[in-house]
Structures are given as structure tokens and as C-alpha cells.
Image (spheres, rainbow, N blue to C red):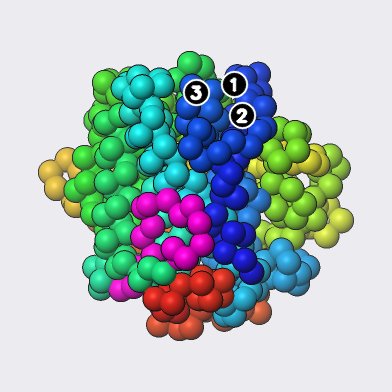
Amino acid sequence: MKKQFKYIIALGLILFTGISCKKEYLTPVPLTSVSDATAFDTPERILGNVRGLYTNTKSGAFYAGRFIVYGDIRGEDFLNETGNLVTGADVWSLNPTGTSTNSVINLWRDAYFAINLCNITIEGVTAKGPSVVGASLTNNYLGEARLVRALCYYSLLQLYARPYADGAGSKPGLPLRITAIKGSGFSDLARSSVAQVYAQILSDLNFAEANLPLTNASAELNTTRAHRNTAIALKTRVYLSMGDYPNVIAEGTKLAPQAVAPFSANAAPTGVVHALQPNITTVFSTYNTTESILSFPMTAAGGDNPGTQNQLGFYFVRNASNLGSAEYSLNPSGIISDPAYATASADARKNLIFTNVSNNKKFVNKYSLPSPFLDYPPVIRYSEVLLNLAEALARRNGAGDAAKALELVNAVRKRSDPSVTIAGPTQAALINAILLERRIEFLGEGLRNNDLMRLLQTIPAKGSVPAKAPTDQGYIWPISATEMSLNKLMTDN
């Protein structure tokens, strides 16, 4: 496979269209090819490159579909219906052991492609932004580029590197590419440690928090492009993955400073006022709510949707209006059988489950739009910030921590089922209740693998697939064969 296919922008530069956000909210820039020297010479060209960061991160093999799918099907809550390797049967069976496996190669390729676009944009905007768009907008754009880069690196760590908990980040991480590759011969780079990659992620997110706008021009843009709270919210996820609970609390409290429900970012001077929606089903039909901190928008325009066999609706459901393939049904022995879910008849989240009456199999129905499946893939919601903060407080267990942790987890639960109140008579019981609530709340949103990895837990058995211990082969993925062939300093897992 040519080096150009993996990293190089075919510079070029391709000036990207505005399809990274819905066209009624952003005026698209015509697709055109310009030289590297002039790609950042006008405000329109700079904005086009920034939009392109979102467009390429939401590729079908990455955040528009497959990365989220993989994050769920590696866990115990889904069963494979087709045995199709093209749609991740090997990922579900915890057996993508070959470095040439499609899932292993394609996700690595698309994530690093997006990273390189971020690096090119950072360098181009740093050099020309101040004179073209002014200092303030330059810093806004740099904040967006660094936030997208942080999201890409964090995502890669969850599959291709040992969890931070295994040796406090001392194990081999990723090649940490923070300068642009614009030609052949620049692929050789040794792996940084997991801790070093996390340090870069946090550096990027801290920069983003300091430089992103407090708010964007519309509710749609506040969902689909980064602002200050986007960086803060993602930091709660990153610190949680590192087991750094004091910093989860510090960041989460910025967005949920209240001691009791209802929680909202409105008491903190951080910008967008985030809050839970009264009805969770609204989050998956009206995508630009205050609960949706970051999602990737989709349109029917060519190149602005995941494409065949990548879409979330294709994988997870087939009903009368959505002719998806129903690749993965819900495991009857998974979370839907847990008493906390199974006996909660009033829980509104059950409205996001579809039962196929012909075979009595259940499917996630959060992504219910028909082909071409234009549901917005969620990146992070306000409910996750609340549960991240709740878990960190429960684990710290200082004065008042358990009380607020209970308030937080009950805010999420009672939003969907006001008849239930979660109790936490012991620290262990409270932590377990929060972890259980995460499985119910984020079913089908790709977070299960993150939770298993960060806690260094065995991946439970499911169907015909045996449990996978942290010491077993396949607990993390091998490194892409393309990376191994191009990078002489690279080592495999």
C-alpha cells in the first residue's frame, strides 16, 4: 500500500468542503485543489481546512460508525447475527489477531489520516492565521484542530495500546505524530509510552479549553463544532481512563457545580448551558440539544455520510422503516437481563430498544433513520459528564462525595425512570451502581470497551465467545500491517 494512501494529503492540499456541518448552518467551500503554499491564504481556505478535520474524523471506518460499533461489540451486550468479517465478526469474537485484518488496518489508517490533517492545519494556521483571520480566530481554529487530534489519539489508545492502569501508562503506546507529513520518507517513528500519549492528549485539550469560543453561532454548531465545554467534557473522559479521579472531579465540577439535581452548566462561566433533556429519546431525534456536547452531523451529500456497511443504523437495527442489516442483536444475557433494567418497566430507555416480533430478538433503536442512515453519531453527551463525575466522587469517597455521586447518578436514572431511586449503602455498591448505569445509558454508543479497558477488567463471555482476560492475546489489537511495513521503528503488540 502506498505511503500516500496512509498519511499524505495528496498535497496538493485538498481544500475540504463544508460538509463537516449541515449545509444550512455552514456555507460550503467549493472543492478545489490548491498548493500547500496557498492552502491557508484566505479566510475561506482556512475555514475549509478546519471543517475538513471533522469531515475526515467522521469517516465510516472511524467515528461515523465502525469505531463506535467496535466499542460496543467487543463487550458482552451484543450477539453477532451474520458471521460477516466485513462487518466486524472478528471484532465481536475478540479475534482480530492479524495485522492485515480490515478492522485493524482501516481504523488505524483513518485515525492517523485525520491526525495528519490536524497537524497540517495547525502548522498552516499558526503560520498564516494571524495575518489572514486575526489572532482570536487563529486561536479558535487551533483549539479545534488540537481537540480533534486529542480525540483521535484517545480513540486509538482504547484499541491498540495497553490500558493506563496496566503499569501506570508505562507500556508502549502509539507513534506520537505532532508534525505534518507532507511527503514520503517521514513515517519512521518509535512508539511513545501510553502515559506520553495521554500527556499530549491533555496538552491539546487544555489548549483547546483556553482558546475555543465560549459558544458557537447556533445550537447546531454547538453540537457539531467544538467550543470550550467540549474540551472540558472530553477531559473528564480522558482523566477517568487514566484513573485520575481528582482531575475528573475538577473538570466535571466545571460543568456540574451544583450539589443537588437538577444539574446544569449554567452556574459555571464556561459557555454553553448543558443540561439533560427531559426525555432521552429526544437526544436521538433532535440532535442539537443542550445534552449533546459533540456529535458528528450527517447529510445525504456524497462523502457526508458513513457509506455502505459503516452506518450505526445498518449495524444495530432492522425494522419496518429502517432496512439495516441487523448485524448485532442485544444479548438476552447481557445488560437487558439485569434486574436494574429488566424490572424497570417505566424506564424510557426501553423506548430505544426494538423487538423483532418474528424472532423475539431485541435491537438498539437509537439510530432509527432509514437508508442512507443519517443519524448523528454521538461523541459525548452531558449524561456522560455527570456519570464520569459521579464515579470519580464515589471512588474518592471524601466528605460529601457519596452524597453528590448519588445525586448525579440518580439524575441520570430518574430522567428516564422517576419511580426508581438508586441507593449506595457502601462505596462498592455505589460504584457498581454507577458502572451499571453507564451500561444502560450508553448502550449502542461505543463506551463499553472504554470502561472495560480502563478498569483492566476481563471482557465477559458472550454466546460462543469465551471471556478474554487482560493477559490474553486479543485483549488489545495488533498494530496495522501498513504501519509495520512503512515504519521501521514500529513494534507490534
Q: Which residue is mark 1?
A: 26
Q: What element does badge 2 sit on?
A: loop
**Position of 297 relative to 69 (above/below):** above
Q: Which badge, 2 or 3, comes first in the chain's sequence?
A: 2
The amino acid type, in three-letter code, at marker 1 is: Leu
Residue at 54% from the left image edge and 23% from the top image edge: 44
**Which segment did they paint magenta?**
171-187
Q: Is residue 172 shown in magenta?
A: yes
Amino acid of disc 3: Thr
Tell me which corner region of the image, top left, top right, bottom left or bottom right, holds residue 157. bottom left
Q: Callout 1: helix, strand or loop? A: loop
Split into 4 quadrants, where in the image is the N terminus? bottom right
**Above or below for 481 versus 286:** below
Percent from the top left, x then y, of residue 346? Answer: 59, 38
**Numbered tag placed on residue 44 in the rendering:** none
Q: Which mark is residue 18?
A: 2
Q: Marks 1 and 3, Cα distance to the nearest angstrom?
A: 17 Å
Q: Nearer the viewer, mark 2 or mark 3?
A: 3
Q: Secondary structure at mark 3?
A: loop
